[in-house]
Image (cartoon, rainbow, N blue to C red):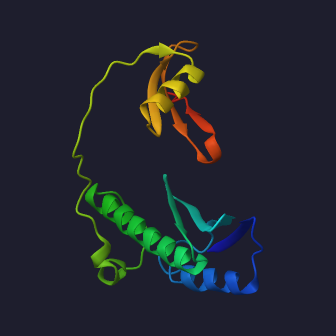
């Protein structure tokens, strides 16, 4: 794997780089050696955040973990990546897709405890989407105290989603049909 490390408000020291390489080296036997793995480290107040992202055929494997201790956040992110790899491999097997040679044969034996049987939806909600512009949707979301809000964009006449980002900013998702 090709590790690319970015730092936001933090200097990436050799010790940090070494810790990341040691933790992620364990994944080498499970992913293609040419895979580019992006790692972003950031510090905000007392929070140390680690984001790990890399592509797998048709999917993106991503972990984002936050802790007061950077090394603890790295450990948690590695655990999250392993869980996602197990889930991805099982999805390939369950759907009768080719396993390719992404994973070693002993992968499931080594990480059997991480397997989630399936995703369980425990709540379903139906509601009417109201036509409004994105700014109105953000105001409505804030009034409801939610982190996201689904609405009918009055400018495009399509269903959109606004969501709350860090530092009191907002994001807009505009789906496109494939």
Q: Is residue 9 visible?
A: yes
Find residue 2 and report its image quarter. bottom right
Q: Quadrant of the N terminus?
A: bottom right
Name which residue lies at 23% across and 41% down.
Answer: 123
Name which residue lies at 59% across and 86% down.
Answer: 22
Position of 119 relative to 160 (above/below): below
Task: Where is residue 68? Give x, y as percent.
Answer: 57, 73
Task: Where is residue 12? Give x, y as percent.
Answer: 75, 76
Position of 62 relative to 80 (above/below): above
Find residue 42 and report its image quarter. bottom right
Total labels: the figure holds 0
Task: Where is residue 142? Give x, y as percent.
Answer: 50, 32
Q: Is residue 101 visible?
A: no
Name which residue lies at 42% across and 67% down.
Answer: 85
Q: Is 136 displayed left or right of 44 in the figure?
A: left
53 or 71, nearer to the observer = 71
Task: Where is residue 173? Give x, y as percent.
Answer: 54, 33
Q: Is 92 displayed left or right of 177 in the figure?
A: left
Q: Is 11 displayed left or right of 95 in the figure?
A: right
Position of 16 relative to 139 (above/below): below
Name which residue lies at 36% across and 69% down.
Answer: 86
Position of 151 relative to 161 (above/below): above
30 or 87, nearer to the observer = 87
């Amino acid at each position: 794997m090709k590790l690319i490390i970015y730092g936001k408000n933090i200097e990436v020291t050799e010790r940090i780089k070494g810790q990341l390489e040691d933790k992620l080296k364990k994944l080498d036997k499970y992913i293609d050696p040419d895979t580019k793995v992006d790692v972003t480290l950031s510090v905000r107040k007392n929070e140390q955040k680690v984001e790990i992202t890399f592509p797998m055929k048709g999917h993106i494997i991503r972990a984002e973990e936050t802790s007061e201790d950077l090394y603890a956040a790295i450990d948690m992110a590695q655990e999250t990546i392993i869980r996602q790899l197990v889930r991805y491999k099982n999805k390939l097997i369950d759907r009768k897709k080719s396993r390719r040679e992404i994973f070693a044969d002993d992968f499931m034996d080594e990480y059997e405890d991480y397997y989630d049987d399936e995703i369980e939806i425990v709540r379903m909600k139906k509601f009417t989407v109201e036509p409004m512009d994105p700014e109105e949707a953000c105001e409505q979301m804030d009034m409801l105290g939610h982190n996201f809000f689904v609405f009918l964009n009055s400018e495009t006449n399509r269903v959109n989603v606004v969501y709350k980002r860090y530092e009191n900013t907002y994001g807009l998702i505009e789906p496109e049909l494939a």
